[in-house]
C-alpha cells in the first residue's frame, strides 16, 4: 500500500501546527525563507527544519535564485492529503453543526426552566 | 451568520494508529454530555447531513452497549456499535466502536475517548480514536469519503480549481 503510506507520511508532516502555518503562508505564493521566518516569528533553524520535513514529503518545492532559497506549495502532492482528511473532517464539521442546533435548544430550555423554577 | 455556526472540526493524526477530532461548542459540558448520551438527541445530530439516524441505542454504564444505525440519502445503511469502558459524567467517556460494514468484526474496532473540558461556559470536546493498526486507521478516514461521495466530488472540484 504505497499510496497510503505516502499519504499518511505527508499528513503527519502537515499535522504539525507550525507546518500548517507555513503551508497557509505559501498558499498565497512563493516565499523566500526569510519571509517565512519573519511571518512565523520562529528562529531560522526551526523554520528550516519544518521546511525540510515538508520538502521530504513533497508538500513544498524549493528553488534557488541567487543566494535566496524560494519555497512554494506543491499543490499536486498536497491534494491527496487534502482530499483524504478534509472530507473526514468535513463530515465531522457537519455533524457538529447539527449538534450546535441541539445545544442551542438545550441551553434555551435550561434558561427557561431556571426562570420558571 | 450566528457565531456558533461554521466552526469546523479539526482533525489531526497524532500517531499512525490514532485520529484526534477537536471542536469547541458554545454550551457548558453538562449539556454537551446530555446531547451525546441521549438517544433522541443523538438522532438529531449524528447523521452529518448525509441521511437519517434510524436507530440510537445507549446503555450508559460500564459494560453497557451502544448501537447507531444511519441510512444515507442514497439508501445505503451503516451501523456502528460498541461498549462503554469508562464513564465520568460530564467529563469523559471511553467506549469501543465497531463499523459493522467492515471485515474483521469486533477485532477491527477502535477505542474512542471523548473528553469534555469547560471554559467560561464553552466546551472543548476532543475525541481520540485509537485504532488497532495503521491500516484500520486509514480505512476509517477513507470511509468518511465514501459516505459523503457527492460532497467529496464537490470538494474535489473546489480543490482542483484552487490548485490550478
Image (tube, coloured by chain):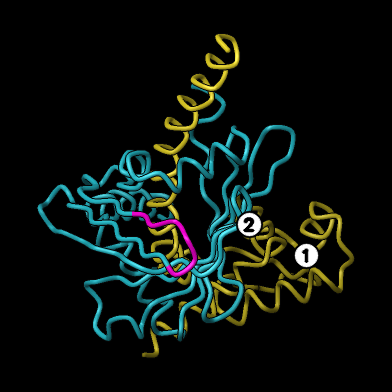
Q: Colour of chain B?
A: cyan
Specify the quadrant that holds the N terminus of chain A. bottom left
Secondary structure of the residue carrying numbered label 1: helix
Tell me if residue B20 comes above or below residue A106 in the rendering: below
Residue B62 within the segment the image draws in magenta: yes
Q: Name the chain under label 1.
A: A
User: Residue shown at 68%/32% (left/top)?
Assistant: B121
Left/right of residue A92 with respect to residue B147 in the rendered view: right
Q: Name the chain under label 2.
A: A
User: Residue shown at 59%/39% (left/top)?
Assistant: B30
Left/right of residue A50 with respect to residue B47 in the rendered view: right
Left/right of residue A50 with respect to residue B150 in the rendered view: right
Q: Residue furthest bottom?
A: A1
Residue B118 in view here = yes
Left/right of residue B122 with respect to residue B48 in the rendered view: right
Q: Which residue is mark 2?
A: A26
Measured in 3D between alpha carbons, the distance from the residue under mark 2 to the one under mark 1, in whole angstroms, is 11 Å
Stretch in magenta: B58-63
Query: Which chain identifier belongs to the yellow chain?
Result: A
- Residue A114, x across and y down, in percent: 60, 16
Q: Which residue is mark 1?
A: A33
Co-location on one chain, circles 2 and 1: yes
- Residue B89, x across and y down, in percent: 59, 51
Q: Residue furthest top?
A: A116
- Residue B161, x across and y down, in percent: 36, 50
Q: Main secondary structure of the magenta part?
A: loop
Amino acid at each position: 500500500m504505497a499510496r497510503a503510506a505516502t499519504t499518511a507520511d505527508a499528513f503527519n508532516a502537515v499535522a504539525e501546527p507550525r507546518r500548517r502555518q507555513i503551508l497557509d503562508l505559501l498558499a498565497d505564493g512563493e516565499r523566500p525563507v526569510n519571509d517565512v521566518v519573519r511571518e512565523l516569528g520562529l528562529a531560522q533553524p526551526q523554520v528550516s527544519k519544518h521546511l525540510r520535513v515538508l520538502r521530504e514529503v513533497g508538500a513544498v518545492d524549493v528553488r534557488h535564485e541567487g543566494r535566496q532559497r524560494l519555497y512554494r506549495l506543491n499543490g499536486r502532492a498536497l491534494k491527496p492529503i487534502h482530499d483524504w482528511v478534509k472530507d473526514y473532517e468535513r463530515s465531522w464539521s457537519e455533524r457538529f453543526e447539527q449538534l450546535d442546533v441541539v445545544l442551542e435548544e438545550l441551553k434555551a430550555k435550561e434558561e427557561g426552566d431556571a426562570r420558571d423554577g | 451568520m450566528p457565531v456558533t455556526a461554521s466552526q469546523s472540526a479539526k482533525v489531526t493524526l497524532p500517531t499512525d494508529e490514532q485520529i484526534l477530532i477537536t471542536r469547541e461548542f458554545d454550551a457548558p459540558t453538562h449539556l454537551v454530555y446530555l446531547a451525546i448520551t441521549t438517544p433522541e438527541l443523538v438522532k438529531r445530530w449524528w447523521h452529518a447531513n448525509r441521511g437519517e439516524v434510524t436507530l440510537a441505542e445507549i446503555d450508559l454504564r460500564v459494560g453497557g452497549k451502544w448501537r447507531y444505525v444511519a441510512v444515507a440519502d442514497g439508501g445505503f445503511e451503516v451501523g456502528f456499535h460498541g461498549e462503554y469502558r469508562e464513564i465520568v459524567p460530564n467529563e469523559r467517556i471511553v467506549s469501543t466502536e465497531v463499523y459493522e460494514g467492515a471485515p474483521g468484526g469486533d477485532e477491527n474496532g477502535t477505542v474512542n475517548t471523548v473528553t469534555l473540558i469547560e471554559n467560561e461556559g464553552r466546551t472543548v470536546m476532543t475525541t481520540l480514536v485509537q485504532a488497532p493498526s495503521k491500516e484500520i486507521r486509514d480505512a476509517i478516514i477513507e470511509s468518511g469519503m465514501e459516505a459523503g461521495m457527492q460532497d467529496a466530488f464537490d470538494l474535489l472540484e473546489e480543490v482542483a480549481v484552487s490548485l490550478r
